[in-house]
Every structure is written in C-alpha cells, then in structure tokens.
Image: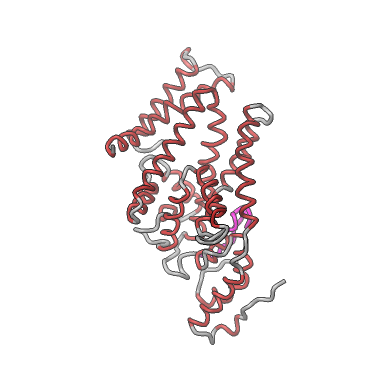
Amino acid sequence: MNAPATNPADLSALSDAELRKLENKIARKHSGMFPWGIVTWAFGNLAVWLALWPLVILEVIPLWLSFIVATVNIALVYLPTHDAQHHIIGRPGQKLYWLNELVGHATSWVMVYPYEVLRVTHMDHHRHTNDPDLDVDITSHADNAWSAIWKTIRQRQPNGKRSGDYLRCLDRHGRQDLILLAIGYRLGFYAILIALAWNGLALEAFFLWWLPYQIAITYILFFLSWAPHSPGMGQGRYRDTKNWRSKVGNILSMGMQYHVVHHLHPYIPLMRTPAAYREMKPILEARGVQLEM
Amino acid sequence: MQKALKALLWLLPLIFGVGFLAPVIAEGLVAAGIAAPFGLGALTFGLLVGGVWGAFATVTGRWI
C-alpha cells in the first residue's frame, strides 16, 4: 500500500504554489497509464447490449430480463466515452489515439449523442462549472434528490432547456456542423425505433432501448451531474465540486464520490480517482473543498 | 432547409406518438391479452392514444 504523500500538519506552512505543486505531483502519479479496465468495460458492455437483441428476438431470454440488463448496459455506456472525451486512453498524436476515438464513437451513439458533441459540450462544462449562463449541465441543479430526478425528466420534454443549452454551446464554439449531426442522430434514433415498431418489434425497441435509455439518463445525470455539483455549490476550482458520501456506495454511484478529483485533474482515469483522492485529501482540506468523507 | 428542419423537429412528438407509441401500445395490449376499449382494434386504439398524446406534446411542449 502506498504511504500518503501528504501530511496535514505540514500543509499550513506551504504557499499556494507549493500546495499546487504537491497536488500536481499526486495527480501525475495516478495518470498516464493505459486504462485497460475502461476499454474492456466499453466494448464488453456494448457487446452485451448488442447481444440482447438477437437473444430476445429468438426468444432465448425473456424480454423482462433483457430490459433489466439493457438498463444496466446503457447506464454504463457513458463513463467509457467520458474517459475518451478527456483523451485518457490516448491523446492526439499518441499511438493509441485511434483507440481513444474508437471507444468514444463506439459507445456514445447508444446514448443518441455524437461523440464530438459530448466532448465539446463536456469541455465547456469543465470550463464553466456551475455558471448559470454557460454551464451546459446547469439544468441538473436542484435543492434535493427527488427534485433532481424530476428536473432531469422535465428537461427531456420537448420544451426542456437542456437540449437548447447544448445547441447554444455548440453554436458558441462555431460548431454548427455538430448541431446538424446531433439533430441527425436524434432523427436517426426515431427512424430506427419507428422502423422496428412497424416490423413487429415495438416492445423490443421499447424495452431494449427507449425505456432503458430514459432510466439510464436519469441515473447518469443524478450521479454525475447533480450529486457532485449541487446543491449549494459555487464556482471556482475548489468550490464547484464536492466529495460526497453516496448512500448506495461508490460502485453504484459510478465512482462519482471522488468527482472532485476529476474536475481538478481531468486526465486521471476514472478508476484511479479514489486512490488519488485519498492521497490528495489533506491538500483538498487545506484548499477548503467540501469533503464528506 | 432550416425552416423545414425546424418544422420537422416541432412535429417530432407527434411523429413519435403515431410512429412509435401507437405500435408499442398495440403490441403491449396484445401481449398482455387485454382487449382495446369500445370494441376498437389494438392498433386503432394505439394510434388514437399515441396520436392524441403526441399532439398534446407537440402543442404544449411536454409529455407529462
């Protein structure tokens, strides 16, 4: 087991620059390795979801069981694409950049978003976290958990603000091409659902994709967006994200208890954020980060 | 082009209601062994519910 790199008693004497240097040293220690776990997760999860379709159509497994598996699959789709958005699997110019992009593209379409749209908007979320005008995820903010769940459902209605925030973000970045691509994905999704439905596979389309997608998006936004950034969180490097204790544990909350580490050092692979957090904790305390564990 | 796309997006809830919800409701009724009310066929009932709900969502901007 690694010894903690920091001793709380020593930190009060350190300057801002020295604290930052120490924090960066820990971050570097937990980054740069090939995240084989997330790559296996990406393709394994996708393979299981794709396999459900023939298994259900050929009546090898019942629809109710495949609905449960599909919901888990789609809830698990986002995190690999999230690591790819941050170029954690391979950076531009590196040998494994193609794999990074393959993971991003291969997983994001299941959530009916082009990978590049997720990347551009997510980088803006990092740049403007909790900014009421510029954070694309600001609509996830809510005073309590039930309100957060209801808001994510409301935001997916045709008049929801969230999709408009995403389109405005793409427009700000001059990526009108991505606006068209995002609309194309949405229309394509509807076309596939309708084609399946009118060919005798309406319940399969509903229980393997549409309903699991709705449940998964609610789950993902709850744990990735609401829990670490709301309620009452402010703006600024050490104020916009908190460490929090999940009632369902770290795995079921998709590792988001340690999301603060991701916002401070987005190049650390998801699976290394708990270890990085444990080493960084005294520094984060010295910085005044809201820590619950 | 832009106007046509905006019109299509505005109509999307109605398209979804008729194109997807209607057959889902119809298949759901058949799978559950439930007869559609008023002597309607399962698909007719699905089209009625999906169409009205989709029109509601198109006009009000919300499904629920």
Residue furthest to the bottom in view is A13
- The secondary structure that dominates the magenta segment is loop
Magenta stretch: includes residue A282: no
Locate the N terminus of chain A and report the quarter of the image it occupies. Answer: bottom right
Magenta stretch: includes residue A248: yes
What residue appears at the point 63 percent right and 36 percent down from the top-left corner? A51
- Tell which of A247 and A281 is nearer to you: A281
Residue A241 position within the rendered picture, expressed as x and y whole percent measured from the top left: 49, 64
State the extent of the magenta-drawn residues as a range.
A242-256
Locate the C terminus of chain A and report the quarter of the image it occupies. Answer: bottom right
Against A50, is A144 above or below? Answer: below
Q: How many marks?
A: 0
Query: Which of the colour schemes (rainbow, by chain, secondary structure, one colour) is used?
Result: secondary structure
- Tell which of A214 and A74 is nearer to you: A74
In the image, taking residue A38 as reference, residue B42 lies left or right, namely left
Residue furthest to the right in view is A1
Residue furthest to the left in view is B3
What residue appears at the point 55 percent right and 66 percent down from the top-left corner? A261
Residue A7 position within the rendered picture, expressed as x and y whole percent measured from the top left: 62, 81
Residue A196 position within the rendered picture, expressed as x and y whole percent measured from the top left: 51, 28
